Amino acid sequence: MFTQTSAFASLQALSKHPIDLTEPNNLTSERISRYVVKGLGFHLLYGTERINDEVMHALLQLAEESQALAKMRAMQSGEVMNKIEGFESENRSVLHTAMRDVFETRETTPSAKKASDQALKELDKLKHFLEKIDGNYTDLIQIGIGGSDLGPRALCVALEAFHKPNRKIHFISNVDPDDDTAVLKQINPKTTLVVVVSKSGTTLETLTNEEFVRERFKEAHVDPKNHFIAVTGEKSPMDDPSRYLASFYIWDFVGGRYSATSMVGAVMLGFALGFDALMEILRGAHEMDVHARETQPSKKSTSSFCPIGDLES
């Protein structure tokens, strides 16, 4: 077990006497320059953390003893990771990485490739959908909760400077009519898309907010069928073409808090930034996935885009 490794014992002992960064001459420019990791254009400076060479050695030892890199590779290849040995629990793969594994360095194991093929199919649907609606809508409201809201919202805010002209994004997650009303005051229903996100299609908070917004659209004499988009599991109660302009799918192997690069975030990002920019985000996430499973973290990974529709590349 994790707590039974020798590295864990070493870290416990070291934690009793951490470096005091308030002491004179401890937080120096030399220290800041020394404790830094670089990769894929990012610089992670961790010199202001309470670590020293002994702690770093023990942490690297812990990664080795716990087989962190091997488990990262196993996760990305589609092995079952969500399980508790000796207890009844779900047994699922964890393949949010497959949602951006659409480049030439794709995983080749059957389960991982099947997942990335599914992701490519949804991206192809999204590409054509965005082309079809281009010029017809100015705003998008995303209705979700938890991971269906926080990840996409963070990406939206972080990349706001790159939004296309006349594209505004809004989020509704709190089950509070005042929140819904505040958002609805900012939009024209006739030029607004509403993305409703629920993997099961039964999330109470999300469905409550959806119905509230639907009623406001009807009161404005706007048919929700021409404005609402479902992001849900295939064949869920929300996978209903009579109620939604389009449906995009997500799967059990993509957990909510890790779902931002699936259709949970992709529909919104594709609308806000454009499809090409969305693919660049996925490219960066994929390259970081490859980087994370390398034995030499400083090694830069490269990949090339696999054209949409060419699932055998």
Image: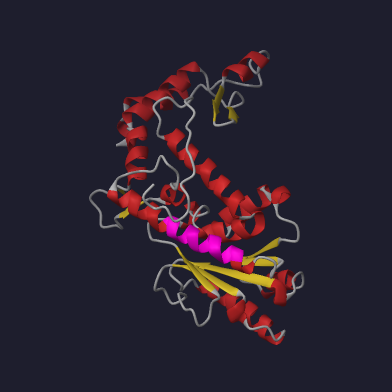
Which one is nearer the viewer's eye here, 282 or 313? 313
Q: Main secondary structure of the magenta part?
A: helix
Regarding residue 148, the answer to whether it shows in the image is: no
Could you tell me residue 294's position as x and y percent?
Answer: 40, 30
- Is 123 magenta? The answer is yes
Could you tell me residue 236's position as x and y percent?
Answer: 41, 73
The residue drawn where x is 75% and y is 74% is 188
Could you tell me residue 285's position as x and y percent?
Answer: 51, 43
Can you tell which quarter of the image residue 199 is in?
bottom left
The residue drawn where x is 34% and y is 50% is 113
Regarding residue 119, the answer to whether it shows in the image is: yes
Could you tell me residue 224's position as x and y percent?
Answer: 61, 80
Which one is nearer the viewer's eye here, 212 or 138? 138
- Is 28 magenta? The answer is no
**Range shown magenta:** 119-131
Q: Is residue 1 left or right of residue 190?
A: left
